[in-house]
Image: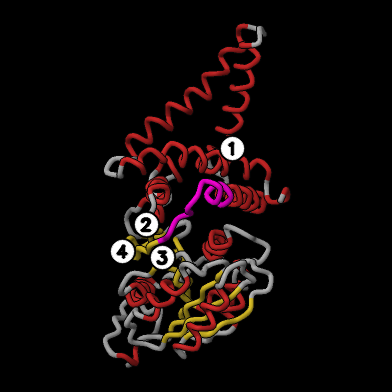
Amino acid sequence: MTRQLGDPTSEPAAEQQWPGVSVVMPVLDEEQHLETAVCRVLAQEYAGPLEVVLAVAPSMDGTAAVAARLTAEDPRVRTVDNASGRTAAGLNAAIAATTHPVVVRVDGHSVLPRGYIRRAVEVLQQTAADNVGGIMDPRGVTPFEQAVARAMSSRLGIGAARFHVGGEPGPAETVYLGVFRRQVLERLGGFDERFTRAQDWELNHRIRAAGGTVWFSPDLRVSYRPRSSPRALARQFYRTGQWRREVIRRYPDTASPRYLAAPLTVVLVTVGSALGLVAAAGGPRWAVVGVVAPLGYGALVAGGSVVAGQGLPTRARAWLPLVLSTMHVSWGLGFLRGAGGR
């Protein structure tokens, strides 16, 4: 008897028992990383049918040319247009252009490890989950990128979510990227195109609200190339903060201290600094108590950088305090402004 995808006891052993897999990848300004990302997908040695669909957005670099060359070199690779440039729209367009029962999301900055797709399909079968995923494993090349990678893997930098810091396998709020059952995506209407960021978290929330399971597996570890400059990092985290605010606006029950810590820190440090300036200018002496917040935050970042930076090269450790504060402040400011203030 042929085993079906979703049977927790199934262990595919023959080629015909591995379901077809559609890899969808939205790409924008990814000339530098796209070929590596696609080639690592094609090198997966997955026994079942495999296709890759790139949703190509209008880019400022040579992304479209790289995508065209990749499609010419391998018939498993195709492209669709993503005129809006939005990640969710690109994902939906790519999904609509495919038919296989398993949909694997990959980003242009991501590099799949050997055996990722095979293992993800096994986890889908063993757990009967609707979406499985694992850890975002940031890997920096330059000292700045190495500092960002370390910050993104630490609780001080980005919180305690398992897809950032690791943990035991099991049901989760969200996971990195995702390997989905097509039937779930079709039933729920795919990704919400109103979300510029956090569309993966929002979809996972709807999966769980509909009674489905999002499963975290720590052995599904995907390499990620972090932003390469303070400006790019600040822009990334500012936009993430904006859309986290939008998620909470639409789903108030998802608010938690973890998401409110950064905006609260920005408010306290700003008010404390202002009070300190008032005291220094001859204002009320009590105003000097305001400096407790900025001094305390500075001490937290400095001390945290020493702990988190262990094992990093000297130049990367030197970047770490700036990286942590940029992530916190940018995320907090974005959250305070909200997605409506784009």
Question: Which quadrant would residue 35 be assigned to in this image?
Answer: bottom left
Q: Mark 2 belongs to which amino acid?
A: Arg
Q: Mark 1 belongs to which amino acid?
A: Pro
Q: Mark 1 points at which residue?
A: 263
- How many tags in the picture? 4
Sequence-first tag of 1 and 2: 2
Image quarter where the N terminus lies is: bottom left
Q: Name the residue under label 4.
A: 219
Q: Is residue 220 left or right of residue 104?
A: left
Q: Which residue is drawn at 53% across and 85% down?
A: 78
Q: Tell me if residue 3 comes above or below residue 230 in the rendering.
A: below
Sequence-first tag of 4 and 2: 2
Residue at mark 1 to residue at mark 4: CA–CA distance: 33 Å
Q: Magenta residues?
A: 224-236
CB-based contact (under 8 Å), mark 1 and mark 4: no
Q: Mark 3 belongs to which amino acid?
A: Gly
Residue at mark 4 to residue at mark 3: CA–CA distance: 9 Å
Crowding near pointer 2: few (<14 within 10 Å), some, many (20+)? some
- The circle drawn on residue 133 is 3
- Nearest the viewer among 119 and 222 is 222
Sequence-first tag of 4 and 3: 3
- The circle drawn on residue 139 is 2
Q: Residue at x 63, y 45 (%)?
A: 334
CB-based contact (under 8 Å), mark 4 and mark 3: no
Q: Residue at x 66, y 66 (%)?
A: 193
Q: Which residue is drawn at 64% across and 66% down?
A: 86
Residue at mark 3 to residue at mark 2: CA–CA distance: 18 Å
Mark 3 residue element: strand
Q: From the viewer's perspective, is the residue at label 3 or at label 2 nearer?
A: 2
Crowding near pointer 1: few (<14 within 10 Å), some, many (20+)? many
Residue at mark 4 to residue at mark 2: CA–CA distance: 17 Å
Mark 1 residue element: helix
